[in-house]
Amino acid sequence: MLLRSILDQIDGELKERDETRRGLFESMRKATRLSKKAIMLVHKGKLEKAEDLLVDVFALLSQVKELPSPHKDLAHTGAVDSGFQEYTEAKIFLSLVADDQIPSKKQLQVPSSSYLLGLADVVGELRRRTLDILRTLDIEKAEKTLRTMESIYDELILLDEAFHSLPSLRRKCDVARRVIEATRGDVTVAFGRNSLETSIEDLNRTIKNST
C-alpha cells in the first residue's frame, strides 16, 4: 500500500473518532444539564415532570453502549462520568422525595463509581430540601430528612476500598459531613424556637383561661 493511502486511511479514522467524540460529549453535556433541571423540578414539587425529563436523560446516556468498538474508550472520559453522576444524583433524590427509597445501581443501570459519587452528592440536595421544609415549620419532617442524610454518609464512609479507588469520593464525603453538621445546627435551632413559641402559646392560653 502506498504511503499516501496509509495516511489517508489513518486521517479518515481520526476524523471519524473526532466526530464520534464531539457527538458523545454534546449528548453527555445535555444529559448533565437536563439532570440538573430535573433536580430543580423535584425541589419545586414537580415530580412527574422531573421523571419525564430523566427518561430523556437515560436515552442520552444509553448512547455510550452504542459506541463503535474502536471508540469504546470514550466511555471512560470526564464528560461521560459527569453525565452518569448527575443522572444518578437526580434519580436518587427524586426517589427519596417521591417514595422515601434509594434505588440500587442495578435499577439505575449506571457504573458503580457514578452511583457512589452521585449518592454522595444527594446529601447536598437533601440539605436544601431540609431548609425548605423548615420554612414550613414541619420540624418532624426536617428531622427525618436529616436522618436520611446521616444514613447516606454513615454507609458511604464504611467503603474503604471505594475510597482507595475513587479519591473524589473522600472529598465528597468530607463535604457531606460539613453539610450534615450545618443542617443539624439549623434543625436544632428551629426545634428550639418552635418549642419556645409553643410554650409561650400554652402560657398565654393558661393566663387567658384563668382570668
Image: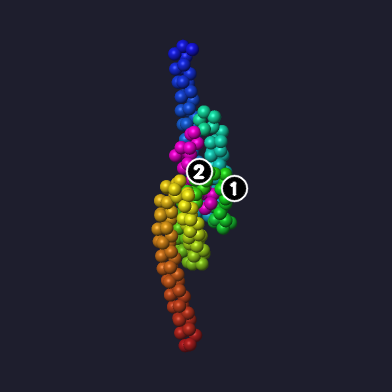
Q: Nearer the viewer, residue 103 or 19?
A: 103
Q: Residue 204's mark?
A: none
Which one is in front, 68 or 142? 68
Q: Residue at x 41, y 65 (%)?
A: 185
- Secondary structure mainly formed by the magenta segment: helix
Q: Is residue 43 visible?
A: yes
Q: Earlier in the sequence, mark 1 or mark 2?
A: 2
Q: Amino acid at mark 1?
A: Gln
In the current view of this chain or complex, which residue is farthest to the bottom? 211
Instruction: Tell how many labels.
Output: 2
Residue name at image x 43 percent, y 55 percent: 176
Picture layout, residue 42 above or below residue 84 = below
Residue drawn at (45%, 20%) of the image: 11
Element type at marker 2?
helix
Query: Residue 33: where, in percent of width, then height?
Result: 47, 43
Q: Nearer the viewer, residue 180 or 139?
A: 180
* Magenta segment: 73-93
Name which quarter of the figure residue 200 lies in: bottom left
Q: Is residue 37 visible?
A: no
Q: Position of residue 79 (x, y in %)?
A: 45, 39
Q: Position of residue 104 (x, y in %)?
A: 57, 50
Q: CA distance from mark 1 to mark 2?
A: 13 Å
Tell me the amino acid under the disc marked 2: Phe
What residue did someone put label 1 on? 107
Q: Is residue 18 above or below residue 166?
A: above
The residue that disc 2 covers is 84
Residue 190 percent across, percent down from the top left: 43, 68
